[in-house]
Image: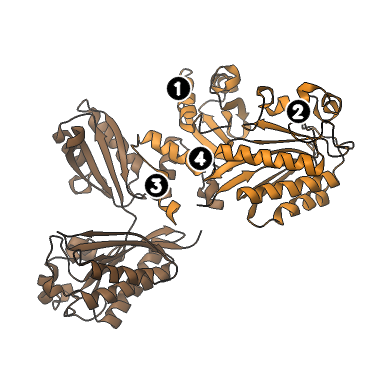
Chain colours: A orange, B brown
Amino acid sequence: MAKLVECVPNFSEGRRPEVIAAIVNEVKSVTGVSLFNVNSDGSHNRTVVTFVGEPQAAKLAAFKACAKAAELIDMEQHQGEHPRVGATDVIPFIPVSEVTMEECVQLANELGREIGEKLNIPVYLYEAAAKQAARVKLPDVRKGEYEGLKTAIATPERRPDYGPARMHPAAGATVVGARQFLIAYNINLSTSDVNIAKKIAAAIREAKGGYKFCRAMGVMIEERNMAQVTINMVDYTGTPLHRVFETVKSEAARYGVNVIGSEIVGMVPLQALIDTADFYLRLEGFERKQVLEENL
Amino acid sequence: MAKLVECVPNFSEGRRPEVIAAIVNEVKSVTGVSLFNVNSDGSHNRTVVTFVGEPQAAKLAAFKACAKAAELIDMEQHQGEHPRVGATDVIPFIPVSEVTMEECVQLANELGREIGEKLNIPVYLYEAAAKQAARVKLPDVRKGEYEGLKTAIATPERRPDYGPARMHPAAGATVVGARQFLIAYNINLSTSDVNIAKKIAAAIREAKGGYKFCRAMGVMIEERNMAQVTINMVDYTGTPLHRVFETVKSEAARYGVNVIGSEIVGMVPLQALIDTADFYLRLEGFERKQVLEENL
């Protein structure tokens, strides 16, 4: 298998198709990069682009898209519901195959330096690439958003990691980082009482004393008259699927409720499924290269 | 993903390295085929070659290897512990990706016809490719072995599916077929009493009323002072890993014994692991294309 990273840049434009197309075309123009998905939201006025490629190719694609966004998006004119600090708001790198988190951190540093030096856009490093504890979480880095950061950037505590300590006049600032793959995971309950789902969500989510890499809410799925625990697994290597599933099962039993099913929404890395099979079958010494398809 | 089949021909030569190399070189000479493994056994006087490739390329590699074996192996001189009917004893095709069992049956028929017509070797079709119930199982097709089949082949019930109704003077006969991927799977018990492993093996194996696609024995693993149920899963799509694992766990509990682990020996198709995760997480509507790596 080749070295591959996923890159999911978010751009502050979700309404003008020609601008979105111009940015996406920069990604498509790079050899060794495969475009997976483009998702634009008008009320957020934001577009999320997902692509996969070899590390250096992915970095080049991210840089070119960021440069195009700086050319076509004016943050002075931007309005939308979603928090943001720049035309290219955030660029995370995610390890996919044969790549470590450390390599993604290195890639984020390289890209951050290039955006700072060549595009004159201030860059903050976040998540695994953060250089300070106060910059690990994206909401902390985006505090005050574009408008507030215009003055705050001059203070020592908001000084960017790369680039000038002043906002780019049109493109604002960009947050670059490295993180694990996020798995969107829902667990369905044999009850229509959404409060049970909310209590279970509170029990498993980090914020309330639950699992470190688990964000969860209890919601009602009206068309099935069913309560659901909806989860973002932000690092399945630290908090695995099976552990969250088993904990939800056990917490639900306390209310006489069963887990009737679970759903993986969108993509899941192969390793997360291998880890699940490994846990339940109590595998001894299983190696990924034993998967037939890994050898083709 | 490309259309891929695995092919695992068995040759009646496990002692002369130059003969084995000549046969293997025929496989290597075909573009579009990847050699996975060559395993020779002196006491069996037999070599098992494993390769993967596009269906037509795999068929060509199998034909060329079979032709070379007919040239270099004289069954009149062959002795070994393992049952066999010919220089190329058996050639199974196994679906790997984007290929159905029906396509593998078709491939077995094409290869069988070519071996019969071009090499004048009688061919029997077995397993999923069998044209009669009495030829599904390999031991039934090999009854009497090379020596016995020399006369039996003239009888109506042993008439080959392709090729002449007489043995090739040096290469004997060849059995060609299609089957599912075989998973070698062991389940380890918290006991040193091999009789418990034997009783559990009897409970799960087809021959004793257990699962249709499960062959099992109870054995003692001396270096761990541990009893083990050792299993061949001959069709994981019909009898899945999780079902056998859970049944062994439940049968072991009847003796106050726990399952302390399990082992997958060698290769396993990705789908078998996906099916395991799907079962235990009670997944709803999961599709293989949601595996990130399947999209690369």
Q: Pinpoint residue A63: horizontal percent, then vertical percent.
A: 73, 46
Q: Distance between the residues labelled 1 and 4?
A: 20 Å
Q: How far apart are marks 4 and 3 (CA)?
A: 17 Å
**Label 2 amino acid?**
Arg
Chain bearing tag 4 is B
Does the CB distance between marks 1 and 2 fall below 8 Å? no
Can see residue B107? Answer: no
Which numbered disc flags the more N-terminal residue, 4 or 3?
A: 3
Nearer the viewer's eye, disc 1 or disc 3? 3
Vertically, is B40 above or below B281?
below
Q: Pinpoint residue A4: horizontal percent, then vertical percent.
A: 57, 48
Vertically, is B141 above or below B230?
below
Q: How far apart are marks 2 and 3 (CA)?
A: 44 Å
User: Where is mark 3, residue-wise?
Assistant: B272
Q: How far apart are marks 1 and 3 (CA)?
A: 27 Å
User: Where is mark 1, residue-wise?
Assistant: A250
> From the viewer's perspective, is B166 left or right of A108?
left
Tell me what residue is drawn at x 80 percent, y 48 percent: A68
Nearer the viewer's eye, disc 4 or disc 3? 3
Compare residues A97 and B103 and report the one nearer the observer: A97
Mark 1: which secondary structure? helix
Mark 2: which secondary structure? loop
Does the CB distance between marks 1 and 3 fall below 8 Å? no
Chain bearing tag 3 is B
Please give the label number shown on residue B284.
4
**Label 4 amino acid?**
Glu
User: Where is mark 2, residue-wise?
Assistant: A142
Question: In which image quadrant can residue A163 be found?
Answer: top right
Q: How far apart are marks 1 and 2 (CA)?
A: 37 Å
